[in-house]
Image: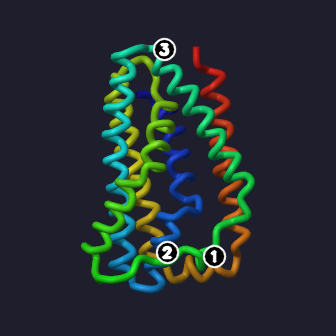
Amino acid sequence: MTFDQIALFLGAAFLLALAPGPDNLGVLALGISRGRAEALGFALGCAAGCINHTLLAVLGVSALIAASPLAFKVLQMAGAAYLIWIGIQALRSRGTSLARNRAPQAGSGFRPYFMRGLIANAINPKVGLFFLSFLPQFVRHSGWSTPAQLAAFGALFAVMAALVFGTFAMAAGPIGTWLRRRERVTVWLDRTTGGLFVGLGLLTAGGIR
């Protein structure tokens, strides 16, 4: 794995974690309505749930490679198309309102909300499909084996999500107030992320041989 390869992945993972979505807006809503402990628990639970999707991606992609290199290329093409579709949806977004994302209720403290975040993320099939499409786009057929690269990228994504979501949790009050007054900021975050994923999908599709 090269420095450029890792840097590109970390940049994409950072923008994805930063872009408004159910996880980070849920963290913000929890921080405002319940407190930092609950928000931090939910944030780290969501990040930990990424490990489950990483394992599924490693096993699924490895099985495809063992069965047929052609099948892996088909997966890459399908993944490229999926990333372009995600990018187009983000580019068309009108922004995401914090007020429309309700914080999970019942229970209190770090642990209950960690489990809520972990389970909510780990069993979400859309997140699983995203990981299966997203991680292989950064694999290079040299150096580390494909399963090792997928596992490393999945772990890096979980760490990045924990850092970004954890920051949101610790600063939920001020960030939430600021976003409610400037919802157009979420539009431009979505568009930046959308442009990234369209470009990544096009580069991937053009680079597959």
Residue at the extreme left: 111
Number of marks in picture: 3
Label 3 crowd (10 A; few <14 / some 14-19 / many >=20): few
Label 2 crowd (10 A; few <14 / some 14-19 / many >=20): many
Circle 1 sits on which residue?
179
First along the sequence among labels 2 and 1? 2
Frontmost of labels 1 and 3 is 3
Circle 3 sits on which residue?
70
In the rendered structure, find residue 127 and report the number of the disc placed on it: none
Q: Is label 2 in a helix, a strand or a loop?
A: helix
Q: Amino acid at mark 3?
A: Leu
Q: What's the residue at 45%, 86% (across, down)?
A: 33
In the rendered structure, find residue 28 and report the number of the disc placed on it: 2
Residues at marks 2 and 1, CA–CA distance in whole angstroms: 10 Å
Residue 50: horizontal and vertical position, in percent? Answer: 37, 50
Q: Amino acid at mark 1?
A: Leu
Residue 85: horizontal and vertical position, in percent? Answer: 65, 42
Q: How is the image coloured?
A: rainbow
Q: Is label 3 in a helix, a strand or a loop?
A: helix
Residue 115: horizontal and vertical position, in percent? Answer: 28, 67
Q: Amino acid at mark 2?
A: Leu
